[in-house]
Image: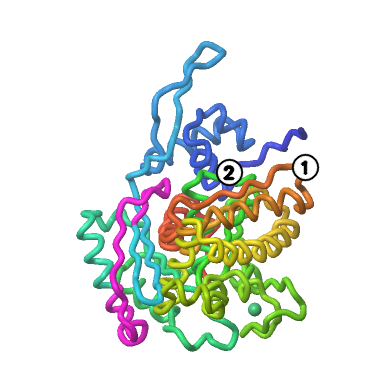
Amino acid sequence: MARRETPAAGPGSRALVVDVIRSARSISRVELAEVTGLTQPSISNIVRVLIDDGVIHETGSADSTRGKPRILLSINPYSRFGMGFHLGAETLTCVAVDLTGGVVGREVVPLATGENGGDLAGRLVARFADFTDGLDLPVNRIEGLAIVAPTARPGFESAGPDLAAVRAELADRLRMPVLVENDAAAAALGEFWSRRVSREQAFGSVYLSTGIGAGLVFSGALFRGASFDAGELGHLSIRYDGRPCPCGNQGCVERYASMAAVVEDARQDPELAGRLTLDGSVSSAYDVIARAAVSGDPQAFALIDRAATHLAVAVASMVNLLDLGRLVLTGPAVASAGSIYARRLRSHLARTAHARNRHPIAVELSAQPRDAASIGAAALMVQAAIAPGHTTSAH
Ligand SMILES: [Zn+2]
């Protein structure tokens, strides 16, 4: 392996050191210098400041082959916290995470229809106070709040609340940093952070919900694109003459593999629709189909397996385009039927991924798929606070 040049300690060095400690779980100063390429004196200085700031702490020693025990360093989880709010169609999910991305508080409250408009900022400020009081989190140890919502479709930007204005008002009233992020991107960063993925890995996540999005993390940073619109996996076409999509294209994978597409297909199958109760919202109807599929209903299984097969074709294109090494499946659709999607993706990638003989392409399932977007939002604030330089917001 080529030896990398020793970089000078610069503004990004602190973020690099934090990121290496986070992904290693615990590591000595000597190993830190080896992994980062920074000099021992630079490492000593950065580590001293990080310990003084409470970001990391010494956690005992490891035996060394050279006889002298080495003190290990790890992230000090409870010194600071990040907050994430996920604005769903009917609910608001509030999450607080520690510095390792571990969830320390979670609450879901109804968000009545029409509440997205009006004084949304005022309601969110009240919710924030209520939530942090309930958790007994000192406000001076909260690094900020990130709000996540689905990405608006082209031509539909004005349909939802003006989140840029809400963000500005919240930052002003809460007197802390406030970010707005899309659900798929936030979920990717949350999985990257809490799974301790190394910044060397080309990491992606697929967020399966009423739509489909992807989040991409390269060198420890979310990939944004020219206008913070990267990751629109749902609008990758898998059939040039396929189903028309509101985005203007045809054959978008979202029209075949999203929760909405699965429910639409199921409702058009008289036998299945007659047997399962598919009225109600898209997410509740989808959950009925998904539960039937994993409980051995062959028709329901075939429907979700077909959606997974369509998704696999799009994901293989994304993996090939970006040479991804690790992928996490997350989002509400994964909560009930994740194993069906994961099996299809793994077998399809094993047969078709261009880099399959050079490196494995791991496909994993999120541990908290329903909350992934809010956990990711909170993790964004943690990353912005302790490994700055990676995080900018769309608003
Ligand atoms: Zn589309």
Q: Please give the range of residues in magenta.
A: 96-124
Residue 9 magenta? no
Depth-wise, is mark 2 or mark 1 nearer the camera?
1
Q: Which residue is mark 2?
A: 198
Q: Is label 2 in a helix, a strand or a loop?
A: loop
Q: Residue 299 lies in what quarter of the image?
A: bottom right
Question: What is the number of callouts on the image?
Answer: 2
Residue 395 visible from this viewpoint: no
Residue closest to the eye, 381 or 104: 104
**Label 1 lies in ligand 1 vicinity (Cβ under 8 Å):** no
Residue 122 magenta? yes
Q: Is label 1 in a helix, a strand or a loop?
A: loop
Residue at the spot 41% in from the left edge and 39% down from the top edge:
56
- Spot the residue most to the top: 67
Residue 65, percent from left and from top: 56, 14
Residue 214, percent from left and from top: 59, 64
Q: CA distance from mark 2 to mark 1?
A: 19 Å
Q: Does residue 361 sit above or below 148 in this rendering?
A: above
- Which amino acid type is marked by label 1? Arg
Left or right of 288, for residue 37:
right
On residue 165, the disc is none
- Which amino acid type is marked by label 2? Ser
Q: Residue 6 lies in what quarter of the image?
A: top right
Residue at the spot 33% in from the left edge and 45% down from the top edge:
79
Residue 330 visible from this viewpoint: yes
Residue 304, percent from left and from top: 57, 64
Q: For ligand 1, which image quadrant applies? A: bottom right
Residue closest to the eye, 198 or 244: 244
Crowdedness near tag 2: few (<14), some (14–19) or many (≥20) residues, C-alpha within 10 Å: some
Q: Does residue 259 sit above or below 28 in this rendering?
A: below
On residue 358, the disc is 1
Crowdedness near tag 1: few (<14), some (14–19) or many (≥20) residues, C-alpha within 10 Å: few
